[in-house]
Image: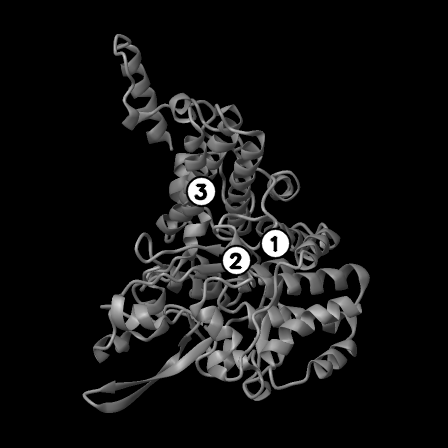
Amino acid sequence: MKKILAIAMILGVLTSCDKFLAEEPRSEMSVDQFFSYPTHAYNAVNILYRTGAPTFYGSGVYGGSRAMLGGYISGLFDNEYKGQEVHVQHSQNLTLNGTNLGSYFDGAWDACYLAISRANLAINNIPETPDLEESEIKLLTAQARFFRAFNYYYLVKTFGDVPLILDAYSSLDNLYVERTPTAQVYAQIVEDLKYAVEEGGLADVPMTENGYRISRSTAAALLADVYLNMSGYPLQEARYAEAAAMARSIISSGNYALIQNGATESESAYNVMRVSDNENEYVYSIEYDASIDDNYWQPAICYPNSATSWGIFAYSITNNAYRPTEEFLWIYDDENDLRVQNKQYFHNSLTYVDGGVEVTKTFETAPYLWHNDEALFETGKNPKDIVVYRYAEVLLIAAEAIAQTEGVTDEAIGYLADVQARAYWQTDRSEIVAKLSGLSFDAFIKAVWKERLRELALEYKIWADVQRTRQYPVTNENEKGEVTFVDVVGHTTIWGKTFEEKHLLFPISENERQRNPNLGQNDGY
């Protein structure tokens, strides 16, 4: 950012020396020039969809995605290529610090603050853009504030206290910003999202019916998630009532529904998720198009590295970059839970024809939800969107938040039962409701936590739940489907490493601390 500002200021000085020029070059527009037409304001918002935290969900074939880091540190997910991917090694070994992963954390920090800088620029200038209607100003500002909140949410969950910057930089003054307390960062996230939900005029329709633009429910889902996390550690602000209200607003809209199972396992809801981008279960999706910007490597991480030698893929490399460990898979009842059956969320075999002969390959369990036949076997280009929030998660947030504030009500039970009934597709929903109705408050809350582990397994929520609850899920091969929660601090992972308090946040890069001496470091690093 400093280099960009310095260059911009030098260019400004040079330009002032040549005032005789009649025209300013359009390829090097100043801020005043840029926000001259409505299209400029729209472009300033459009770029936010592809800057910062949203890009962390796209996967590389070796290193996986940044969103996977929590799964790695939890010890419940592995990467077949961790021998060269040091961020995986240090996360699993709990040896990460601001030096050995300095460049890795730089990438996340810089990307988020670039997005925040762009959002600030948009928020500050959209109201002054000529020829914009008031409704357009609100709509564009709501989207910009959503993405500012989304990026700060990633930063505060990852690093704790971070600099809170709300104005666009116009000079080199005040570059060494100190970290802002976590509570204040969260307060700004809430303010931005409340504007988006209540004042922004966002369409109250599913994102899939809104040209894949942020809708009111998208902002409400993120805000519900934020309130849920604020209710846990480190803030413990008890914002469950607000989380319930946001989740209920999405549910009561009638715009969303769980995808239903078809008649066969191949027609299950989870296989619909795998192939379809246009479902009303999707509340926030990151859109891809194979002809413009494809979600390139995600199908390639559905197979082991050895599969490269099979000679059947359109990809030159495959790698099981987010391999669920056996200990994670024991979270599921492998007899009754559809999600853990082969070719649902996960798979461990492939049958194909080679020279007229049917060949079956088996391998360690890998994600199947990202498998795409056309990309894998024909084009090498993957158009599949990445879903960040689904209606299933909204129901689970509602179930937990309502139980926390109103008790284990029929409503809370019903929302959890909806998610479970789809997974336990051969069990009558009434049986599920009856079983949940007999649970104590503590047992019901933990039943929701378990369901979040199972349902959101490939949506990277696991570490955020450990952070907010301070509880770690322990499984047992002899009691599949059962989960015991223990204090995360002091727990030893399957890799033989013991969590300390410091591991609940990641370190700030030493590179960033050298650039900004006012940052300090998280305790223990």
Q: Quadrant of residue 485?
A: bottom right
Is residue 522 in sight in this rendering?
no
Q: Quadrant of residue 231?
A: bottom right
Determine the secondary structure under disc 2: helix
In this view, the residue in front, 455 or 198, is 198
Extreme-left residue of the structure: 355
In the image, what residue type sits under mark 1? Ala
In the image, what residue type sits under mark 3? Leu
Quick one: quadrant of the N terminus?
top left
Please give the label number shown on residue 221: 1
Give me the residue at 66% from left, 59% from top: 254
Which label sits in the foreground, 3 or 2?
Answer: 3
Left/right of residue 249 with respect to residue 463 in the rendered view? right
Give me the residue at 52% from left, 58% from top: 503
Q: Quadrant of residue 255?
A: bottom right
In the image, what residue type sits under mark 2? His
The residue labelled by disc 2 is 503
